[in-house]
Amino acid sequence: MICQNGFNLEKGQNNNRMYQHDILIIGAGLAGLRAAVEGVRNGLNVAVISKVHPVRSHSNAAQGGINAPLVDRGDDWEDHAYDTIKGSDFLADQDAVEIMSREAGDAVIELERMGVIFSRGDDGKLGTRRFGGQKIARTFFVGAITGSAILHVLYEQALKYGLNIYEEWFVTKLIIVEGRCQGVVALDIKTGELHLIQAKAVIIAAGGAGRVFEPSTNALICTGDGIALAWNAGVPVMDMEMIQYHPTTLAGTGILMSEAARGEGAYLLNSKGERFMEKYAPDYMELASRDVVSRAEQTEIDEGRGIDGNVLLDLRHLGREHIESGLGYLQEVAVEFMGVDLAEQPIPIRPGMHYIMGGIKTDSDGATSINGLYAAGECANVSVHGANRLGANSLLDTVVFGRRAGAHAMKYVRDISETFIDEKYLTDERNRLQRMIENNGGERSAAVRNDMARSMTNGVGVFRDQNSMEKAIANMSDIMNRIPNVSIDRKGKIFNTDLVFALELEYMVNIAWSVVNAAITRQESRGAHFRTDITGRDDKNWLKHTLVFKDVNSENGVRVETTPVTITKWKPIERRY
Amino acid sequence: MQVSMRVKRYDPELKENKSWWQGYKLGIHANATILDALIKIREEVDGSLALRCACRASICGSCGMRVNGRARLVCKTRLEEIIQKDGELNIEPLANHSVIRDLVVSVDSFFSKIKEITPYLTPKSEPVTGEFIASNESMENLLKSMNCIMCGVCVSDCTVLEVDKKFIGPAALAKAWRFVEDPRDDEKSQRISYLNDTEGGIWDCTRCMQCVEVCPKDVAPMDRIMEMRETAIRLGHKNSPGYRHSETFYRSVKKHGRLDETLLAISSAGWTNIPRLIDLIPIGFKALIRGKLPPIIPHKAEKKEAIKNIYVKVEKEDE
């Protein structure tokens, strides 16, 4: 029992190699594993720490594909870069987008050589499908399981190189000493023991924060841990108001139906059977940017042309064979979760929270404002997605910037000598967790989380306005007041998920608070941040990023600043699809 | 709807260190999955219930459990369907895995088997530029195995693993198949040699079909194992008990129209494998005492010519 014995200190752990690494990576999804492979195959002592086994990571859920402008196919990196920037509603930093587009081809070819089984064309080369917001087909894919297929192959590479993996360990704190990140305190969920892990550099690749909203396509593990860890350590989070609502999530459960369906030609229909995208995006139709399609759907629903709060995704004209061979996983989900055969019936869908464009502010090498602390993947904001991410750019982001963060961290650690962290960091954390376990406030973490998540969806949804955001802020203040009352049913040590959920809730509340404070700051509509009370984009005043800092001296605990967007060669113009 | 269910609990921190069944009654919507119900229990009734789950969409492989004695992914199993079919709902952790707490099992043994099969591509030479060129059919064929999400459901219900801990098992063997068949891999013959020769390799499957039945992603591990057996034979691996077993089976039935069980036992062991043959002696005696020893001179089927004709016909079709 934790409350009786407390967490045990590992005896003599400073001599234990297992707890000392050159690079420690938090998160074992695509960004984390790609960063890890970079370090470990170059001979560094690298470890990955993840609260779930690597192959359970949420990168699994990416279905449709990965974008890359391959030159030998007549594509041009500038076209991909421009589609990305236009998709971002000109909020992406163009120098970062350029890096991503230029490195995309090599990144995808490298994945293929590692063993990913991409779909191929008749010539035996990798084949493509078309994705939203892009003029041409440049999305490489594995059926509708692209993320899973890549994740499993990166895990294979991790096994090949003998990567150290802390499976089912949960990071409770970053250790920043003398302005440098030097490790973490982490809970081994299986034993309930708390440990210090020292590292010369730490890369946060802990994924998104979808559970801050309800419903969401995200896995139950997407609780923004990494973003909150960095934010609490003093790193600003950028553009947190930019929340992506995916146009096609299942009615009821909110499970994702990949954009690949529309990429392969599926229609969106309203209750009258009309392909309503004609009105909103006559050129791109169903394949406009996600923010545009989600708003169109919500408008149809709000104006009474929906069906029980949904519209329809229709694949019937694609034919059974095409659906089952190219989109097999979608058919599986439709049949198993909705009892709908996609070859026979349209399926009810609606916009659902899917991705957070915002995140830990980093440069294009993944470096944050703290020495030795890096971030990559969904938890980071480089920024390549700006106000709206294009489908199939998230996988690309993870492997390009995962690799870059790994490579830069490798250079950084060369000049860092091993230091030993004072064990007081461990003792402090042990005491904090002990207090949480002993707390008898009577609130269940799940109840608080559900109230928070529903309130966030209402306040900062597909459409938002001053009133809805103020309400969300008020609600969040109440939620934060309830946190000290959260109590934990289980008092034992082994696999105490009840304790983990309480810790996650604290992270989620940090995220939610930065989202609402960023959202209310931006006095315009841009990309996913669409205000019904200020419908226009305002490049004169708001072509800039929002930054939210933790600030214990301010009244509401945060400080919001702005910073310019990097514009290189693409001047912002009106965005039409 | 109102649902009654029982969950197998286990807490190593309790003094008694034993497992028990705990009943729950809860109201839940008619479309709910078993995972929805377990989460509802965890969130509203008993926060101490331990289980793994993440994606809720049958892609992360976290929530493999046994439902009324059969392993399933509970996120894609609807409550109502099971209750209608079985009349009850009993949830247990996966079998063939050691239990950590409640419904959470250790995956160490599962992944140690994965590590055993050299689970990564081993190409000899890579193209200077661009991707490997390979036909789409040859690559899409591999998706049969890439669909595996390592949920452990097949391993749970594998009848061989129940008695033979060394068996590499359906999941890891299905993964091995993916590398054997991958046109980019250069160690196909080394892989097959290992899987053929090692204890617990491809010949230890008894073809009970359980893994094919329970796999939630249609990987059909047993079919993958059978394909590797054929590959092994094609590559000239004829020295294994498994091969001798199937070869003797084939010849015996062809010759006598019936199986000569005595010959099968001796021949599978190998005529020169003295230690294994000595092992068979007590088994033979026990069989004799219980009147179950097969005749030394095998019975012949009455219509063995008809059986021969079946062979002729099938083999013609194969050509």
Image (cartoon, rainbow, N blue to C red):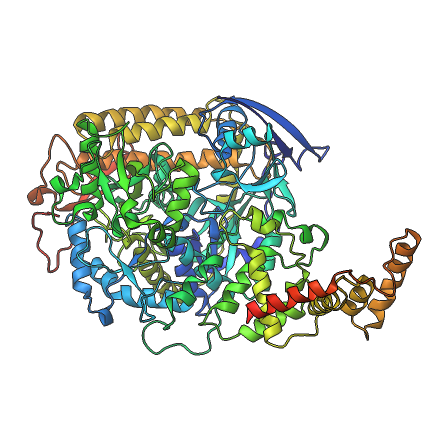
Where residue A138 appears, as percent x and y from the top left, is 25, 60
Tell me the quadrant of the picture where the N terminus of chain A can be found: top right
**For the point 56% across and 35% down, which residue is it?**
B50
Q: Which quadrant of the figure has residue B31?
A: top left
**For the point 59% across and 57% down, which residue is it?**
B222
Q: Among all residues in the image, which is located at the extreme right?
A: B289
Q: In this view, does A259 lie to the left or right of A36?
A: left
- Residue A208 visible here: yes
**Of B75 and A196, which appears nearest the observer?**
B75
Q: Which quadrant of the figure has residue B84?
A: top right
Where residue A215 appears, as percent x and y from the top left, is 34, 33
- Residue A205 visible here: no
**Of A447 and B210, which appears nearest the observer?**
B210
**For the point 85% across and 63% down, which residue is it?**
B280
Q: Is residue A280 left or right of residue A232?
A: left
Above or below: residue B176 compared with residue A340: below
